[in-house]
Each structure stands twice: as C-alpha cells, then as structure tokens.
Image: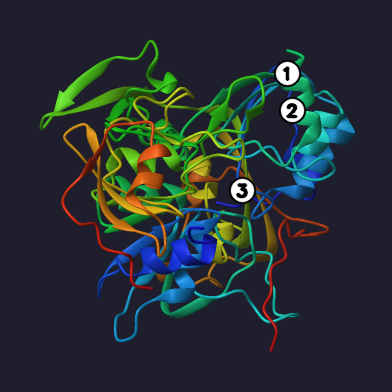
Amino acid sequence: MGLDKTGIAKRIAQELRDGWYVNLGIGIPTLVANYIPQGIEVEFQSENGVLGMGPFPFEGDEDADLINAGKQTITTMKGASFFDSATSFAMIRGQHVQLTVLGAMEVSEKGDIANWKIPGKMVKGMGGAMDLVASADNIIVAMMHSNRAGVSKLLKSCSLPLTGVACVKKVVTDLAVLEINGGAFHLLERAPGVSVEEIQSKTEGRLVVHGDVPEMSL
Amino acid sequence: MNKVVDNVGIAVEGIKDNMTLMLGGFGLCGIPENSISELVKIGVSGLTCISNNAGVDDFGLGLLLQNKQIKKMISSYVGENDEFERQMLSGELEVDLIPQGSLAERCRAGGAGIPAFYTPAGYGTEVAEGKEVRDFNGKPHILESALSADFAIVKAWKGDTEGNLVFKATARNFNPMMAMAGKITIAEVEELVPAGALDPNEIHTPGIFVQRIFQGARFEKRIEQRTTRSK
C-alpha cells in the first residue's frame, strides 16, 4: 500500500528540530509545513526572498507582491523578513538554513539527485535547486519510490541530467525512510504494512538492511 | 541629483536592437511591466534578456517573446510559458539556464566590480561544462563570471527623485542586484516622492545605481498562482 503524499510529509515533519530554518521545495515538501510537531518552532525560508513564511492568505487578502518560490500567494508570520535574491542564496550557500526538503525524479545510491530536466521533454530550468543541493548540510528528498511507469527512482546511478552530486543524505518515500551512506541506501523504516521484500524489489540501487526494520510511526 | 524622466517613452530611450537587458522580477512579482509594454510598442528586437523567468504567454516578458523581440534568454526557470517552449525547441530562441543563486550573484558581481567568483552550485552537472573547477576546503567549486547589461530595468514600490528605491515584500527579488549591474538603470516605481520623503535608514537601493526614474502609469500586478485558505 504505502503512504500517500500527506503521509510522506508527516514523516518528514518528524525530522524538524526546534530553532531550525527550513527551505521547502514545491510539491510534497510544501505539505511538511502543515505537520510541525507540537512544542517546536521552525521558520520557513522561501528562496525568492522571505524568511518566516506563513500559510496561504484568506480569500480577498492575496497580495501580488507576496509570493513563495512556487509563485503562490502567501502570508508572513510575526518576525518575518524580506530580502533580495543574492542575500537569499547567501543564506542557502552559507549554510544558515538547517534543512532543505525537495522532490526528485531520481536519486542514486551515491547521493546524486536529478530533478530539473528531461532532455527533449521537460526543459524548464533548475531554479534554485542546484544552489540548494550544492550547499545544504541536511537534504531530505521527498518522493514516490517508483515513477508512474512503476520504475524505481532509487537507482545505482541517475540517468537524467544531474542537479547535484553526492549531496542527498536521506530519502522519504511512500514505502520507506532510507539513509544514503557509503554508496548504498540503508533502510531505516518501512511504511505501515510494507514489507522489506517489497522495498527491496522496488529499489534498483544497492539496499542495505540492518536486522529488523521498524515501521514508521505517524 | 534629479533622475526623474517624464514618462516611460523617455525612460527607455537609447534601447536599441541587439542590446542586452536585465529585467527584475521573480515570476510576475516585481516586474517592470510599464517598461516591458513600451518595449513591445517600440519594437526593438534581437534582445538578450537576463531575467529569472520569462513571464507567461500574455504578460511580462512573454509579451516580448510573442512579438519575437528576444534572441536570447538568460534565466533560471522558464516554465509556465508555451510560446517560450515552442521557440526554444524550434531553435528560434537561444536559452542559457543558470542556477538561481548563481544568476543573482553574477548580477551582483557585475555591479560590484567582481569579475568572477567560485560557487559550489552546479558542480558535477551540465552547468559546470567548460568551467574552471577548483577545490576550497576539500569541496569542488566552479568559476562563474559576472553579468552586466546595456540597460537594467527594475521595478520598485517607492522611489524618490534622487533614484533611491524601496521595494515591497517579495517584489524585491532580483531588482536590487540588477539595478547595480546596468550601464544605465531605469527604475519604474508605483509611487514617486520628493527627495527627503523616504527615510534614508530604509532605502534598499541607493540612488547611485539608478540613472532614470519614473512613476508607472498603470500597474496590473497580475498574480500567477492565486492560493488561499477558507476562513
């Protein structure tokens, strides 16, 4: 069965720690903001130039001058700040942002990530993804374990043009939580009701299983 | 020093075919829409445009694309624009895609007298092809060069007659760096005020970077993705 997108977001939210500045990519990562664990405070950075991003505005309160990196209308929290794009990427490359969560088309067992281009099909540009993955200390990829055609997205090596090399440390999919280390995916947790065998069969890259693998608690 | 010009027509005087322009904005947020409309009107072509995005089909830089006035785009993300995709795939339009942070820093460098800099962004990807690689602290970086432009066109919320600018919220984005990197920088503002009306403590872009300033006649400020929650 595996998790839906909300489930993936809920599991990633458990990785948040008090006092962190966090950059959330477009798609599943955006949903993480809805499940911040009780009792901790995090601040969301959007690379177009806002720190302290809040929820979507109430209808009628939209401001064309206030958007996130997905070009969606947003609000700000108390204590928010605005800045230019050079300052924004100084925060990112300078490792002032503690966690980056982003989606991917492919991740390799070496921690390479491809998420910006399908030659001949989708050529929209990398936006801030290359800057984010090149510098972040702590990158979590949120994605489905297989693509729509059923092909594994956790590979020995990426086939699509790379966004960054040897940078992804952790992947949370609909089936599992995996850590990338020493050229392999290490299985940390299974989604409820998903067997190690199923995860093994849907992981093309090298998968290392250490003893009994616990189920995620959501 | 008074930088005020009477209208957008005078503001864009001197922009000619085959020039390189920088245009501020992120998506449709903070784009110099009055100046873009004027460029459509005067019909300059063969332009190289440096801008994070390329607008949508019927707004922003998309208008110049529709009119085939752009020869080359230098951007970080160009989705949401069918005409762009068509021209790119058919080879009519030259496109240089650059990581967003590198684009911002290359503009900043261009205005700050820094000819090039090393960044980790893009190492090991096609962005690094043909670029010098050097290790710092055990980590590989690539050499990126500064960008400059014949004209930079930026949009601010408020500006004064001296060319000092204040931006609103996330409409700031690339505007301050581009203002620094233009040989001539044109600022269109929503509200033009006399010198002294803006608090010097709160100026985002000092007037030294701005050569011409005018109050835009009309701002549509279109929203690209209207997202709301219910009360």
Q: How many marks?
A: 3
As rendered, which of A184 and A88 lies closer to the eye? A184
Label 1 – label 2 distance at C-alpha: 6 Å
The amino acid at mark 1 is Leu
User: In which quadrant of the rendered image does the C terminus of chain B lie?
Assistant: bottom right
Determine whether label 1 and label 2 are within 8 Å by CB.
yes
* Residue assigned mark 1: B89
* Residue assigned mark 3: B25
Q: Mark 1 belongs to which subunit? A: B
Q: Horizontal and vertical percent for residue B134? A: 20, 20
Q: Does residue A23 sit above or below A39 in this rendering?
A: above
Label 3 – label 1 distance at C-alpha: 25 Å
Label 3: element kind: loop
Corner quadrant of residue B168: bottom right
Label 2: element kind: helix
Taking the view exactly as shown, the residue that stands out farthest to the left is B137
